[in-house]
Amino acid sequence: MEEAEKASEPHAGTALAFDFGEKRIGVAIGNLELGLAHPLVTLSNENKEECLRSIARLIKEWEPVLLVVGLPVHADGAEHELTRRSRRFAHRLQARFGIRAVLEDERYTSISASAALDEASVRGRRQKQVLDQIAAQLILQSYFDKRNAIT
């Protein structure tokens, strides 16, 4: 993140992060001052309007000052179809809710989330229920770590 970008972003308040997927969207929450992210919920994305209503409820409840959306790219950084859809999702959130939405590289977050859940003996169906929100947590934590690394 560039210095100018950091300066224009809020320094205090709640951030919500999203791991966008065609079927599910993982959501995590964190505090900008503390720089700690926590898994929150996994939303179904099969009905787009219902999903947006669920996001609206989360925004009303948590009153975030920033939204962070994972940006999926190939290992070499090349973009693909889900990259475009994630960008569109971030723009839609910002336009609809009037809250700044930033994109965060999410390479390997699902793999890391699955490995962490395996280590915690959470597997199979139980893992599927929380995998996306753990991935969202990793996306938000990555955002916090980069933000706090800039001095």
Image: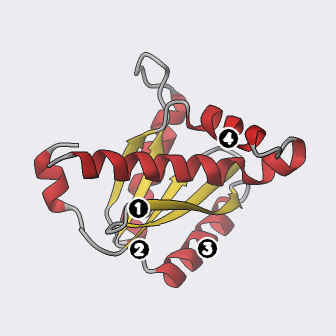
Marks 3, 4: nearer the viewer: 4
Give the residue pinned by disc 1. 67
Element type where label 4 sits in the image: helix
Left or right of residue 42: residue 103: left
Task: Please tell me which residue is depicted at 47% across the width and 28% down the height of the picture.
Answer: 73
Q: Which residue is mark 3?
A: 53
Residue for badge 4: 116
| Drawn side of residue 5 relative to residue 92, left or right | left
- What's the CA distance linking mark 1 and mark 3? 16 Å
Give the label, 4 or 1, closer to the camera: 4
Q: Residues within 10 Å of mark 3 (few under 14, many from 20)?
A: few
Q: Kindly indicate the quadrant of the structure image that contains residue 108.
A: top right
Q: CA distance from mark 1 to mark 2?
A: 7 Å
Q: CA distance from mark 4 to mark 1?
A: 24 Å
Residue sitting farthest toward the top? 76
User: The residue tagged with tag 3: helix, strand or loop?
Assistant: helix
Looking at numbered disc 4 in the image, what kind of residue is underneath it?
Answer: Ala
Q: Hey, what amino acid is under mark 2?
A: Pro
Of badges 1 and 3, nearer the viewer stands 1
Contact, CB < 8 Å: mark 1 with mark 2? yes
Question: Which residue bears the numbered disc 2?
Answer: 64
* Residue type, numbered disc 3: Arg
Q: Is residue 19 visible?
A: no
- Which of the two residues, 132 or 51, is positioned nearer the viewer here? 132
Secondary element under disc 2, as helix, strand or loop, is loop
Marks 2 and 4 in Cβ contact (< 8 Å): no
Residue 42 on image: x %, y %: 69, 59
